[in-house]
Image: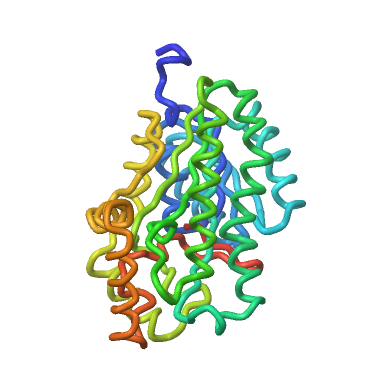
Amino acid sequence: MSPRTTPRTRQARAVVTGAGSGIGRAFALELARRGGQVVCSDIDHDRIAETVEMIERAGSGTAHAVFCDVSRTDDIDALAERAEELLGGPTSLMINNAGVGIGGKPVGEIGLEDWQWALGINLWGMVYGSEKFVPQLRRAGRGGLINVASTAAFSAAPGMAAYNVGKAGVLALSETIAAELGGTGLAVTVLCPTFVKTNVAVDGRITAEAGRLAGTLMRWTGLSPERVARGTLDAHDRGQLYVVPQLDAKAIWAAKRHLPRTYTAGAGLLNRLLPAVAPTTAPTALATQPTSTTTAPGV
């Protein structure tokens, strides 16, 4: 295949943030399986070392571990520079994946410190990554950007404001960059799942009640990270902007577009009827694997 006919996710020079576990690890493993060079970044040294070891054992593709706290601009700057050195050229596929889970409290009880913590990673981390890597993508000439958001980007479930706002920003960011890159050889894909089987209910800043319910729903209804990663990469190869992988996510998307008042009223009613658990009863999925400013497992 010529460079222009090879799928974007094949033999990619890729960077994956939050590659230490969950969806991020699944992305890294699948990209390596597709013959790519993968820079695996995370704030947890042990976890990214495990990811790199798994890729090396599989014997396909190559991998490198690079520490990065996505909430710090200096770390993102260093990641961009180091990635180009390790990959032997500009990054052709950037996957902004690192994120944190937060939920269980209404606005007015969340606290500004938690707002700043969550948005610093879930939103600003994506902004920083896009600002530094889109120029590399342009120089590569072909490839693209994948941002991991969530159904929370449009579901507006009560009790999840800090998470919802961050993921809504990621969705808007992705749509904007897609328009800006129109007519180039680059694609943008934004992933908006509901529940994915990660340890988001254990890590992050989630109330005990919300965490227990989220963990149960993930076990019973969540997709595997591997399935989500494969499907997203295939969609990116097709140039698909939105990836909404589950039926419940598609139903929420449709309801918000066509019956917005009914949807909002229903979410509010559910919140009043089940105040202890309502923050996660709407299937909005804290789908990104939590990170923090001190520990950043991947999505």
Q: Position of residue 159 (x, y in %)?
A: 44, 76
Q: How many marks?
A: 0
Quick one: which residue is furthest to the front in this view?
A: 261
Q: Residue at x 53, y 21 (%)?
A: 184
229 with respect to 294 (left or right):
left
Q: How is the image coloured?
A: rainbow
195 with respect to 191 (left or right):
left
Q: Residue at x 52, y 77 (%)?
A: 205
Q: Position of residue 133 (x, y in %)?
A: 64, 37
Q: Position of residue 107 (x, y in %)?
A: 53, 78
- Residue 213 image-quadrant placement: bottom left
Q: Residue at x 47, y 27 (%)?
A: 11
Nearest to the observer: residue 176 or residue 93: 176
202 lies above or below 26: below
Quarter of the figure that contains the N terminus: top left
Quick one: which residue is furthest to the right in this view?
A: 74
108 with respect to 237 (left or right):
right
Q: Residue at x 22, y 54 (%)?
A: 247
Nearest to the observer: residue 34 or residue 107: 107
Nearest to the observer: residue 24 or residue 183: 183
Q: Position of residue 64 (x, y in %)?
A: 59, 43
30 lies above or below 53: above
